[in-house]
Amino acid sequence: MTLHQIGYVAGAVLVGWILFKLRVYPAVGAGYRAKILCTGLFGSGRPFDATLHTQISDDSYLILRPFRVQVDREARTVTASLLGRFPRTAIHRDGLGATLLAGRALVGPSAALTPSSRTPASEWLEADGFDDMKRVVANAFTEPNPRRLRRTYAVLVVHDGRIVAERYADGFDARMPLPGWSMAKSVLNALVGLLVDRGRLSLDQRGLMPEWRSPDPRAAISLEDLLRMRSGLRFSEAYGNPWSDVLHMLYDCHDAAAYAAGRPLGSAPGTVWSYSSGTTNILSSIVRRVVGEADYHTWPRRELFGRIGMTSAVMEPDAAGTFVCSSYMLATARDWARFGQLFLDEGMCNGERVLSRDWIRFSTTPTPQSEGRFGAHWWLKLNPDIGGDSAAAQRLAPDAFFAVGHEGQTLSVIPSKRLVVVRLGASIHIDAWNHAQFIAECQEAI
């Protein structure tokens, strides 16, 4: 090949790379806007008002402001585009929530999924008193810094199995399902635990994906490695970069698990901890194959949510039909608390064993490679951006553990204090919400 030909090929490659990069921004931006609006409008039942609009168009998200949306309430779809180009559509289905379409046929049941039943024994009891706790909760709805809004939507505190404080922002109430974002990762932990407890999966199991077959080095990744986020797979979890793996996976992919499973190794399995939403979606795909196609979409409701009274819970799949357990699940604040109570009560609910004590213990045992910050799809320490390195964090009970999601969603479980605390909102400036301070005050109010 001559120098001229080499230069021509290099130039063509560069132009192709630039065009790809330019395409990704509008595709991801439109996908994000369509999906979040579809979930808010048809999943939570929120009006398309200034509150919802601001949540996805805050000053920190100026990059999204040029995108326009069209809502079809009859079809329950939301389409977003950048000046009419690169449109992305999300569709809402009963029992399955919102799914972002990514250019290929939608996979999964077309019929509505019926809700699971709730027994009277699963209803919450409410306790009188606890005025100090109610003051702490009321303070969570204040806005001390108008430039960095907290946007707390719901707070629920359960002590010893009874509600001791509960409050909602204007426009929200106890019946409204709200997204937990990465709190769904901890729910995926429970789904895997059901299969491990029944001997259908094992923690040392390897060769977990069809494309991970020896001599592929990814065949060495174990189920425990995936649960503890130490698979070694290269995956960028950068939400401020539209070209990161996590945003491409969530907003420009037909099959999130396939994309994540196709990533190469960056380190030997089991040696390096690295938080990855892709890892969770790989686990979700594994659960799908083990449970079987005929049962998969109803199985979480039947085997987990229905048994603990989480009737509002909806897990949302991608267009390939696999639940996006890294990020997409809705439930009311009371139902998120039911999930936390299951772990507080060591896997028991209404006198029935749902998860084994061994699984609860495993889930909350520190992953050594994480320096004690992470268990198995549960956080054991809070990150600095929500107060994890503050003085308040030192006041937290050492046995506390947390499900934590984007924009300050938190489910806190503190066994020694018999506390379960749910906080849901839209803290786009994440450091506006000091969760360590809030939980420390909850503990002290008890």
Image: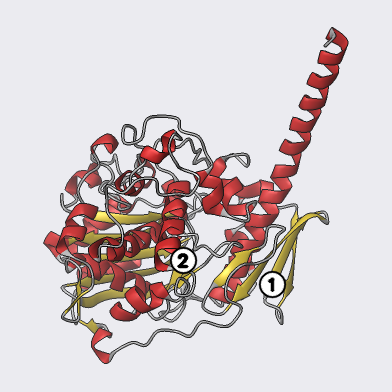
Q: Quadrant of residue 90?
A: bottom right
Q: Is residue 61 above or below residue 15?
A: below
Name the element at disc 1.
strand
Whole-percent x and y of residue 112? 56, 83
Viewer-nearest residue: 413 or 296: 296
Task: Return the residue found at the far left.
Answer: 416
* Sequence-earlier tag: 1 or 2: 1
**Other residues around mark 2 within 10 Å, as few (<14) / some (14–19) / many (≥20):** many
Camera-side residue of 155 and 25 = 25
Q: Which residue is mark 1?
A: 77
- Which residue is denoted by mark 2 in the rendering? 329
Disc 1 to disc 2, how far (Cα)?
Answer: 18 Å
Q: Residue at x 61, y 46 (%)?
A: 248
- Identify the residue shown where x is 46% and y is 66%: 329
Q: In the displayed structure, does residue 19 sit left or right of residue 181?
A: right
Q: Is residue 104 left or right of residue 239?
A: right
Left or right: residue 177 compared with residue 32: left
Please name the amino acid that badge 1 sits on. Answer: Thr
Q: Quadrant of residue 119?
A: bottom left
The C terminus sits in image quarter: bottom left
Q: What number is the disc on residue 156?
A: none
Percent across and percent down for residue 110 are 61, 78
Of all residues, the one furthest to the top in this rendering is 3
Q: Tag 2's secondary structure?
A: strand
**Where residue 424 sits: x, y (%)?**
41, 64
Q: Is residue 390 above or below residue 444?
A: above
Q: Quadrant of residue 34?
A: bottom right
Is disc 1 in contact with disc 2, using a CB cutoff of under 8 Å? no
